[in-house]
Image: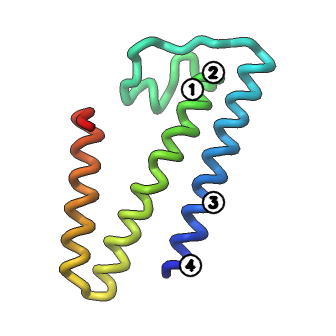
Amino acid sequence: MEAFISRLMRASVLLSGIIILAGTSMYLASGNDSCPVNMFEPSWILFGDPFLAPSHIIFMGFIVLIGTPLLRIILSVAVYAKMKDWEFTAITGIVFTLLLVSMVLGVG
């Protein structure tokens, strides 16, 4: 399972790099630097305004990059639960909950 998680994390980081590179290339080719100031709301993250602007593509790459460790934690919870290691399942679940709460509240 560790090998699978490792491959998945490498693929996720590679995908993030490709997305960021694509957005940067779009920016350099078009010169479009439209990016809403202080508009990082869920609707902008999902749909963008304007959608598929270089800034939006780059931001989506960073979302994938930030999601990579979260994916690792989710998979770790599943692995520990499958192994019936309840102590590590609880600890990893608490870490995941704290990360989600801090992201939603914007703390840290």
Evaluate if marks 4 and 2 touch, with contact meaning CB atoms under 8 Å apart. no
Q: Classify mark 1: residues with Cα within 10 Å, few (<14), some (14-19) or many (20+).
A: many
Q: Which residue is mark 3?
A: 11
Position of residue 65 relative to residue 82, above or below, is above
Image x and y of residue 65, in percent:
52, 46
38 to the left or right of 6 = left
Position of residue 85 relative to residue 104, above or below, is below
Q: Which residue is mark 4?
A: 3
Q: Earlier in the sequence, mark 4 or mark 2?
A: 4
Tell me the SS state at disc 1: helix
Q: CA distance from mark 3 to mark 1?
A: 21 Å
For badge 3, the amino acid type reads Ala
Residue 24, by quadrant, is top right
Q: CA distance from mark 2 to mark 3?
A: 24 Å
Q: Classify mark 2: residues with Cα within 10 Å, few (<14), some (14-19) or many (20+).
A: some
Report the residue at 65% width, 36% height from top: 20
Q: Earlier in the sequence, mark 1 or mark 4?
A: 4
Q: Which residue is mark 2?
A: 53
Q: Which residue is mark 1?
A: 56
Q: Classify mark 3: residues with Cα within 10 Å, few (<14), some (14-19) or many (20+).
A: few
Report the residue at 71% width, 20% height from top: 27
